[in-house]
Amino acid sequence: MRSKKNVETIKLQEGETHKKAFENYKEMAENAVDWTLFCSYQLKPNFSEGIYKILQLPSMQIAYTDMEGGIMFDYVAPEGCITFSLMKNISQKACLDHIKLETGTIAVVDDKKIYNFICSGRVELLDVSLNKNSDSMLLEKLTRAVDKYYVDDDQRITALIKGFVTEFADSSNPLDTQTSKQIEAHITEAMLELLDAQEAQVPRFTKSEKIALEIKERLFKHMDGNMNTMGLAKEYGISEKSLQNAFKSLFDLTPNQFIRLLKLNLVHHELMQSSPAESSVMRIAQKWGFRHMGRFSRYYTELFGENPSVTLRKASLTIDGMKAHCVERKEEI
């Protein structure tokens, strides 16, 4: 299992609220109160810009996140909680492990598992993390629905939860106990009503999409410079066209684009941890399979907003969401 520890997050006491805009991965990770984000990959410029608004209630945490998107990362939900994760707005494509996310999707996740999240555009979501010690009927129902999903067709529960966040998260004053309990009661009633009206749904995919998900997870854990669409399609027994269509359907990327973005991130991470005296841009780029330095430099600059030689000269130790063990590499190019 990959390390969960990346940055220390802000802690809140019962009744406290939190509002924070973030402009980079480090701010995004450390302000995700009680959540653990790690092994991040940047898929677009400005990938981790957004805002958090959080309410800490007696037995649940309400977290609203609005982020620019174009990111992939692993995460662990708040410890000791089951989370009801409601997609307020999915602007393009997004997947949570083996759940294809759309506006209105409600995924149920557990704190004992590492989940992978990928999105190609802006995402707004509302997370209700219910403490497992609450011993409620709602907790019992959610426990049976872990790794399944519901749908908020009429956006009623979305509007209810977002309304509480909008009303109270901007205040500098803590919530009093009575107000906190009233908010919890309203949200619990709405969630029970929805869960009683629906059966939790099991994610379903086409054969090609299942293969695409398997390949995505494989590449996320292990990368080398020889990966390409033709070889992967042949290995998994499907056509290149089917594999491309499945990747576009799930991630809004072709397999080759996905592979290139992952390799660019691995180069970026290594450049940040190196210095000109120890290494060179060419050596690191070639290590991860880039042979045409002109194209590599253009791709890198488009994604990260600076020339790779600038990154190397910075010799920055800024946390970028990755560690050496976020990806395995068994070959050298």
Image: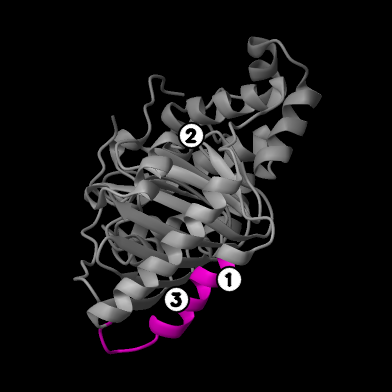
Q: Is 169 in the magenta?
A: yes
Residue 44: x %, y % from top left: 58, 56
Task: Classify residue 26 as left or right of residue 240.
Answer: left
Can you identify the residue that label 3 sits on? Answer: 165
Q: Quadrant of residue 202?
A: top right
Query: What amino acid type should be assigned to the residue bearing mark 3?
Result: Val
Between 111 and 27, which is closer to the camera in this rendering?
111
Can you identify the residue that label 1 sits on? Answer: 159
Query: What amino acid type should be assigned to the residue bearing mark 1?
Result: Ala
Can you identify the residue that label 2 sits on? Answer: 286
> Which residues make up the magenta segment?
158-175
Checking the image for residue 116, the label placed there is none
Residue 230: x %, y % from top left: 71, 20
Q: Secondary structure at mark 3?
A: helix
Quadrant of image for the N terminus: top left
Q: What secondary structure predominates along the stretch shown in magenta? A: helix
In this rendering, is residue 248 above or below 297?
above
Residue 12: x %, y % from top left: 22, 70
Between 192 and 297, which is closer to the camera in this rendering?
192
Residue farthest to the bottom? 172
